[in-house]
Image (cartoon, rainbow, N blue to C red):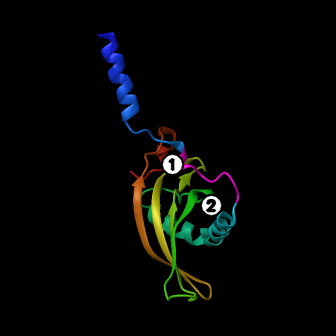
Amino acid sequence: MKKIINAVMLSMAILVPQTNDLAFAKPIQDSEQLRVDDMLMLFMTPNIYEAIGDYYYPNILKVKPEIEPWHISVIDTHRVNGFRGFVFSITVEVEPSLGHHVPVGKDHLTFRVSVGPSVRLINHNHIASYGLPSELQEWAVR
């Protein structure tokens, strides 16, 4: 009986898909694309902060959550007006946080960026809300 249980457990361990850290790995090496993405996030952070703040404060949180460039990922970019046009659509994924360490949610923001520079929020899609730990419940709107 013991051998059967061990065989079943071994079979399950082999056959059941496992989450691989490499599938979700963050970059470990600098690249031209990573530098361009990071520079873009530095320029976009004030607009992202404003859009996220307007969503979470004052209806969800009593303060505006923080936005850090390393918690912003570029999801999609494209030219709105064709080849060599200078009107862009940029979609980013953001994980705003409280106190730099406690993520409060996940959002996708789409901006239209054009000459000027002009940055305009086109779409805000709230993906997920994360519960706050007990020591930060005072910041949640009840």
Q: Position of residue 15 (x, y in %)?
A: 36, 34
Q: Position of residue 79 (x, y in %)?
A: 52, 82
Name the residue rendered at 50%, 42% in the picture. 20
Name the residue rendered at 57%, 61% in the picture. 72
Amino acid type, residue under disc 2 in the picture: Pro
Q: Is residue 43 above or below residue 27?
A: below
Query: 22 or 61, which lies in front?
Result: 22
Q: Is residue 97 above or below residue 21?
A: below
Q: Quadrant of the N terminus?
A: top left
Amino acid type, residue under disc 1 in the picture: Ala
Q: Which residue is mark 2?
A: 69
Query: 125 or 3, which lies in front?
Result: 3
Q: Position of residue 111 (x, y in %)?
A: 50, 76
Judge left or right: residue 75 versus residue 127. right
Specify the quadrant of the image occupied by residue 113: bottom right
Earlier-in-chain disc, 1 versus 2 = 1
User: Can residue 94 be seen?
Assistant: yes
Q: Which residue is mark 1?
A: 23
Q: Which residues are magenta?
A: 22-30
